[in-house]
Image (cartoon, rainbow, N blue to C red):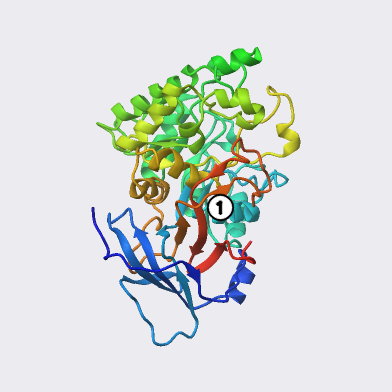
Amino acid sequence: MGAFYAPVQGRSSIQFPYLAGLYKDKREAWRTEMILIKNGYVVDPKSGNEGIADILTEGKKIVKIGPGIVLENREGLQIIDAAGKIVAPGLVDVHVHFRDPGFTYKEDILTGAKAAAKGGFTTVVLMANTQPAVDNEETLDYVIRKGKETGIHVETCANITIGMKGQALTDMERLSDKGAVGFTDDGIPLLDEAIVKQAIARAEELGRPLSFHEENPAYISDNGVNAGRASSHYGIVGSDRLAEIDMVRRDIALAEGSKAVISIQHISTKEAVDLVRQARKTNPRIYAEATPHHFTLTEDAVIEHGTLAKMNPPLREEEDRLAIIQGLKDGTIGIIATDHAPHSAEEKAKPLTEAPSGIIGLETSLSLGVRELVEKGYLTMKELISRMAYQPAELYHLDAGYLEEGGPADIVIFDKDEQWTAGSYLSKSSNSPFTGETMPCRVHYTICDGYVVYSLRPGYV
């Protein structure tokens, strides 16, 4: 285990009268030139180093990491005493839905960014199943421009196929040139093998990842609910685990021999985890992501919470949950992503078979990771941060997820032991089965590009 420096005694306190908003105009008005973070326990998944240290940022960069940093000239300096807290790279979520354009009554890019900052995320990658879909330059440009109005880094995927119809590829080269960081038809599986092969070939040429939603509708009668104890409880057929297994097996085979990077989204079954594990022995460009809800809950949550625990792919059985955790532990699954999926209360109040699938997750993700993976001994804190920051950033070739001199001033400061109650979300929506639960690990500050974009201090939200 690497270590920065020997422990430093101190108590947490706020030493500055500073106020910041999330939006660009407010950030400009309240900008300070430098931030000095004192006495925090710094965890860097890239170098492997951890220990007590100070961090000094200037503008958008970290300029110094070391013990006892002292500056004689404090003009324009903001000081945060992080004693007793963990200082880590800003989290990176490569699978979120901000519903903008088209469904902004559920969420929009500005409110989604607020929720992300509260959860400790400084970079997010948006999915492309909006209305209109991100299959054209105009919509892509809109999303990128609006993302720049927030206080965090908002990246976006573009669609693999035109209109998400699975029939013809988008102009992937043009969309990549215009700023798309990856390609996905998330929400809809690609059923035509010929289209998948074409997409893999184009992704290899462009060096952009493909993210696949792996659910074969041939095995699904009522989506969002596992075919098992949960479906029996509601008297419906549900979604058979074969829906995922079949598609994962197919896409791993189609990627054989290619240098394209493939990501299996929101993995939910033990069989799919093992398929990825075996595939990575010969093809390390096969990746998988796991959501906090899939490593925390089982189908029993659907029986307890109804539509608030309905999602695609559905929550499965305890053996599947444990297999996902084992996959995260042994490196088979290198990415934790929320699949943040806001829906209105009116939509979630519909009958189970009519309500949309999905839950919000940005504001509870870190806490669930700490509670379910770190506190229970499956991952170290450094490993958790790696899967929530450094490894997701690597997949999408983003300059994020690490702490080093000259690196980005994107930082989260949190107290892993402080408890809080899930709720009072900054997202427009509140569709979560975790609402009301007591959680460990509270985010105190999120810093992006050298700005404080979220703090518990009044005025930041």
Identified at 54% across, 23% down, the residue is 299
Count of marks placed on residues? 1
The vertical placement of 336 against 296, above or below, is below
Q: Which residue is at the front of the view, 379 or 395?
A: 379
Q: Can the viewer see residue 261 in this picture? A: yes
Is residue 238 visible from the viewing direction of this image? Answer: no
251 lies left or right of 418: left
Of residues 441 and 121, which is closer to you in this image? 441
How many other residues sit within 10 Å of disc 1, few (<14), some (14-19) or many (≥20)? many
Would you place residue 377 above or below residue 39 in this image?
above
Question: Where residue 258 sits: x, y (%)?
Answer: 32, 35
**Image spot of residue 56 (x, y percent):** 39, 73
Residue at point 53%, 33% (across, down): 168
Tag 1: amino acid: Ala
- Residue situated in front as seen by the camera: 56 or 210: 56
Quarter of the view holding residue 378? top left
On screen, residue 247 versus residue 380, left or right, reads: right
* Rendered residue at 55%/56% (across/down): 117
Instruction: Give the percent coordinates (x, y) of residue 451.
Output: 52, 69
Q: Position of residue 391 (x, y in %)?
A: 37, 47
Residue at 33%, 53% (x, y): give it. Answer: 45
Which residue is under mark 1?
A: 116
